Image (cartoon, helix red, strand yellow):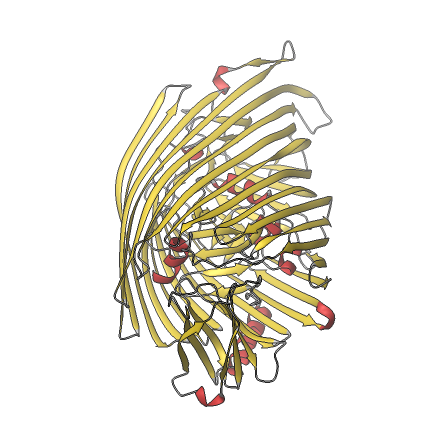
Amino acid sequence: MKKFILLSLVLLLLFTNGAIAQRYSVKGKIIDNLTKENLMFVNCVLYKDGDSTNMYKGVSADTSGSFVLKGVKKNNLNLELSFVGYEKHNLKIGIDKFKDDKEIDLGEIEMKSNGSLEGVEITARAERIQVDEDKLTMNIDEQLAASATSAFDLLKKVPGVFIDKDDKLTLNGKSGVMFQYNGRDLKLDYSSVVDMLKGMTPDQVEKFEVMTNPGVKYDAEGTAGIINIRIKKNQNYGVNGSVWGQTSYQTALQYYGSARLSYVDDNWTTSIGFSPMRWGSKGKSRDERYTSTPSGDTILFKSERDDEWVWQNNNFNLNANYLIDTTRTIGLSLYYTAGGNPMIDNTVPYLISSYPNYSLVDSSYVNKGGYKSDRGNFGVGLDYVKKLDTLDSKISFDFGYSHSENESYSLNLNEYFLGDINTILTRREGYERNTAASSDNLNTRVDYFKPIKKTMRFEAGAKTNFNFNDRDFYSLVLDSTTNEYLNDEMQSNHFKYFENINSLYASFSNTFKKKLNIRLGIRAEQTNTKGHQYAIDSINTRNYFDVFPNLSFNYKFKDDNQLKLTYSYRISRPWSGSLDPFISKSSEYSYSTGNPYIKPQYSHSISLGHSFKYMLFTNLSYSFTKDDINWLQSPIDSNLFVHNPLALISIPINFGSNHNLYFSASFNKELLSWWRFSSSFGASYMKILSSTNQTQINRENWSYNGNISTDFTLPKKWEISIYYYFYSSSMYALSTSSSSQDISISVSKKFFNDKLGLSASISDLFDMNENYRETHYLNTLSKSWGNYQGPNISFSLRYNFGKYYKNKQVQKPQVESFDSRAGESK
């Protein structure tokens, strides 16, 4: 670990010192030479003088026609502007233009319509990791997609994200992440989000956007921040698409595929995609649980098992935007996923022994179980954008509806023995359980954006959200006399949960003397909830009102040297399943239940970030979370039912408070025209302080993470990508996980004018140690191990096709302007 940290710091210093000198920015604004209207999405490409084949820098103009090319070295350059329906415009930038202020302002640049239009593709290549003042973005290129087996697997590679062996996620050391899908909130519990991401192929994802301090335009949900999953769509004129397939093997054969088709003209921008996948894995794991009894004995529960997982899924998505006229746009987005797990049987023996002779088995039981599920998710969104004036004022209306359902069946048969599993069978108990769970979410919002002069911006909006959850749990219990499964109302449950959130927000920003930008925002949310457990006819209601301020101060020493200070106040509400008080039994020694009295957790966060020369980004943040929500296993209260001193029950509680200090540094640079390099490093300190009614929870922990990515572009269109990451031992609530590391290598080659691409990759090369997790609370110490499954080898193929045609270009108001604009003005 020390060697890795030292290596990262040395590389950062070397590459930083080698590139500090003579970095400039080139900016301008592009307009139509006749109408004088702004031209957005123009391709702006810099070439070194005398070299018209190798692009030096590239970017697309934004919705106001403005562009900035950053990190430019002092040289004689040629700027080429190209856009559908316009003549190419070339502008020479001599070395004499590079002055001491490190900024070259080209002013307004006029482009002339050519009357006939050829399709133009954006040639600028996005950096894999991009960090700006509001968010961190990880762009998914072909090499990165080839190294992963699902969108969830890709998420593990995002800097600051840590996912342990049980799929629990923290962002910069904090739990409580809100997920979005193409800028829309995913109103699903975390386990459903995991299932959804595992069912998505890596080729579907365009980028992950991580916002640790979202502005007030966004819901205040998520104390750790927001992770937005952007799905690929095409902006090239004409009919075009792609077909992609991948097969991989680690412990089982897996396949993934996707097909996308797009149509774009002056009025329509449409894309449709379909992706099937089947994922499977096998492994071995073992668990040990040490429980001390009131009599002073320590009892060991020990198990070893062979695990098998299978997941299959089909995804469909549709996006369509229609230009009504030059000021109005309407959009439709739709997605549908269907999949699940086939029936898989697992047999797990549990051996019970006592101190000091743990090798002598006192008693045992065998759990024979099986599980299968069918899941589906559907979502539809409609949006309307109206441009109000030439100053780019806009109003937007948005409507969204989503539905998810999960039908599962599980068989759980426990056989108890007097000694080990080969001795006398004392009794049997079994359960057949059918669960039908559904969730419906309906939301609508309106957003207004108004520039005031050139330096001021005002935005405001309102949103209402309704969420309905229904979980019907039907249980059959084995009758030991007839050996048949009979209905047991005491083990069955029906729980409904309703949540309504109404919100208003307003934000104002102003830039003083082109140096200091201050943004002040406030969001008010009123929450109404109702939980109804039908088995005991228990109803719990709650109503509360919160105000969430958000502040931002951004100071520009120069365009390439900026400092930003932010403050935010956010909330994480408990999900419906954690509020259901029904007690579910797995065995005589294991139970679980919800907690209807659990409170939301609130978090204050402050961060200081610095960007230097568009290549070195540092951030220091601190957060304080009150009423931190976590699950723990504790002894069962004897008032609940017949007391078993060895039985534990899993229940969510508000721990107390959580303090988190996090430092991160990232470095991105194109070292040579054929070599890209990026690296990031993070260090986190977490401290948990228990509330007055909890004991043995106070804990603290330091953890570290880092990654290095390098890409080589070789002759004849060969590319090699190498990615390495490391996570130290880390703490999640009361659990501590072992360190992990991995290196992945991918090689790709393009053929037939880049239409056909082939790639091969190998990952999980170095992670040869067992995954380990330890949890200690009150009288119980739990340990678990998962074995290393070996390297993962994959092969993928992509074919791009399309036909571009001539048409007249009409200026379009951007449908997603409110989402993207929020990233600029917050």
Image height check: is 621 above or below 577?
Answer: below
Toward the viewer: 135 or 232?
232
Image height check: is 345 above or below 236?
Answer: above
Toward the viewer: 39 or 363?
39
Q: Quadrant of the C terminus?
A: bottom left
Image height check: is 276 above or below 164?
Answer: above
In this orientation, does residue 221 appear? yes
Residue 534 appears in which quarter of the rendering? top left
| Residue 164 place in picture, x, y as percent | 56, 49
For the point 66% across and 56% down, which residue is it? 146
Q: Is residue 425 left or right of residue 154?
A: right
Q: Residue furthest top?
A: 482
Toward the viewer: 62 or 807?
807
Q: Quadrant of the N terminus?
A: bottom right
| Residue 465 place in picture, x, y as percent | 35, 38
Image height check: is 97 above or below 499?
Answer: below
